[in-house]
Amino acid sequence: MKKIIVLILLAGWGRLPAEPAWQFEDYFIDQTLRIDYDHTGTALQDIYAFDEAYLEPYWAGSRTHLIDTLDLGAYLFTVQDHPTRTLLYSRGFCSIFGEWRTTEEARTRSRSFSESLRFPMPKREVRITIHARDRNNRFQEVWSLDLDPSAPEIIRTDFFRDVTVRTLMHHGPSDKKVDLLILPDGYTGHEIKKFIGDAKRMTRILFDTSPFREHKTDFNVRVIEAPSADSGIDDPAKGVYRDNILSSSFNSFGSDRYILSYDNKTIRKLASRAPYDFLYILVNSEKYGGGGIFNLYATCIPDNLWSDYIFVHEFGHLFAGLGDEYYTSDVAYAEFYPRDVEPWEPNITALLDPDALKWKSLVDPDTPIPTPWDKSVFDSANAAYQRQRLEIPAGSRRDSLGLAHQRWIHEFNRTRPYWGRVGAFEGSGYASEGLYRPSIDCRMFSRSQTGFDPVCTRAIIRVIRFYTGSR
């Protein structure tokens, strides 16, 4: 009987090959193999340890676009046929651990997070390898696992068999569409109808937003009706704790508005009831909050003044690996982007080489790089707003102030000389200096309800085409 063997690999990873000439059926069956592992460490070191393997009933992904050509994510995992070392599958991704290690806490203590890799169920033994970006953003092999699909260690149990899966939008077979699955957290049995209504409303908001509007028929959307014992989610900073099914919580990494769940295994077990490419967790709360991690999941609250903005903004993180372009809000990260390294995110640049600007093809020849935008005026107005905001208790007065400030941002930006143009505008990625964004305003920069700028739009469409095989 073959055993599961863990190997540590140190060699570098080169350029990925083009799409394979072989057929899906040559190496895979139409189900999903999920590998759960523990990712433990500090800011300076990390350790990977195999946990469990699961056979899931559905494979929702493409049967032709199996090799990742997007070059997104802080990590990349590859699946090779063990006997021949043929590359069968790869995907870029980000993780909670990858974000946590940039916080102050990671400098003084270690933590462990559960993570998962999902790919089509192989017909014979494979080698699964994780590649992490080094400080220069080059992928290096850090951990590898050999796995025989016939091994008895692979768990083949169906979980959450009593939940209901509901289709909100169906446009075709999963292997040719992007499958979005929305999960509830903090909705009791009496509130499941509310969850369905919230999910329909948020889905409508997403597909009213360009470029998702123009590509609506490239998506399927499903929800799972899974009640929690308590209504709402944890808010540790206020001493509030709830018995909710997915353990979502405010105050992640010490940031009051950041909503995450560390219960990866329950999320994955519940999600296995339906085919999916991307996961969204809708949490039952009115308090401002959300989160989005590329190729992991996104979170959003449905009942806040800013819910429409949050849902679409966080989906930008989850779906296209878009980075935050704002720099005036408090975040938990100590140094998310090293200043001497070009970020991998498609919409942020350190502008280390202006002549090699990653979105240069979208820049008009007469647009200066860097691009002036009266940043000092914006910064002064924003500082005044933040002081005034802190003097007002949370509630309708603070909301009114926020709305007025976002209207000011929109009016200020649209009257700048380079409004509507792609350039390199300083202030992005949580940094006031040294990082640049493509446009003065964007859904990834402000809550002014400005749409995605041309660079973000291009990045989103690229992912849609990769998953659907469209041109």
Image: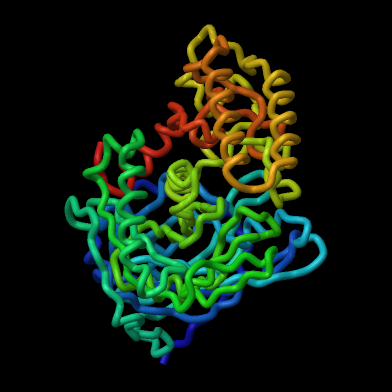
261 vs 36: above or below: above
Q: Position of residue 131 (x, y in %)?
A: 56, 58
Residue 329, by quadrant, is top right
The one nearer the camera, 55 or 268, is 268
82 vs 92: above or below: below
Single out the residue that lies furthest toward the top.
366
Quarter of the image where the N terminus is located: bottom left
93 vs 347: above or below: below
Q: Residue at x 31, y 65 (%)?
A: 193
Single out the residue that lies furthest toward the right.
108
Q: Is residue 237 left or right of residue 24?
A: right
Q: Is residue 215 left or right of residue 365?
A: left
Single out the residue that lies furthest toward the bottom.
1
Residue 416, by quadrant, is top right
The one nearer the camera, 87 or 337, is 337
Q: Position of residue 15 (x, y in %)?
A: 48, 46
Q: Is residue 71 visible?
A: no
Q: Is residue 437 left or right of residue 298?
A: right
Quarter of the image where the C terminus is located: top left
Q: Is residue 145 visible?
A: yes
Q: Position of residue 406 (x, y in %)?
A: 56, 30
Q: Residue at x 29, y 68 (%)?
A: 274
Q: Is residue 96 left or right of residue 253?
A: left
Q: Residue at x 58, y 18 (%)?
A: 412
Q: Position of residue 31 (x, y in %)?
A: 28, 71
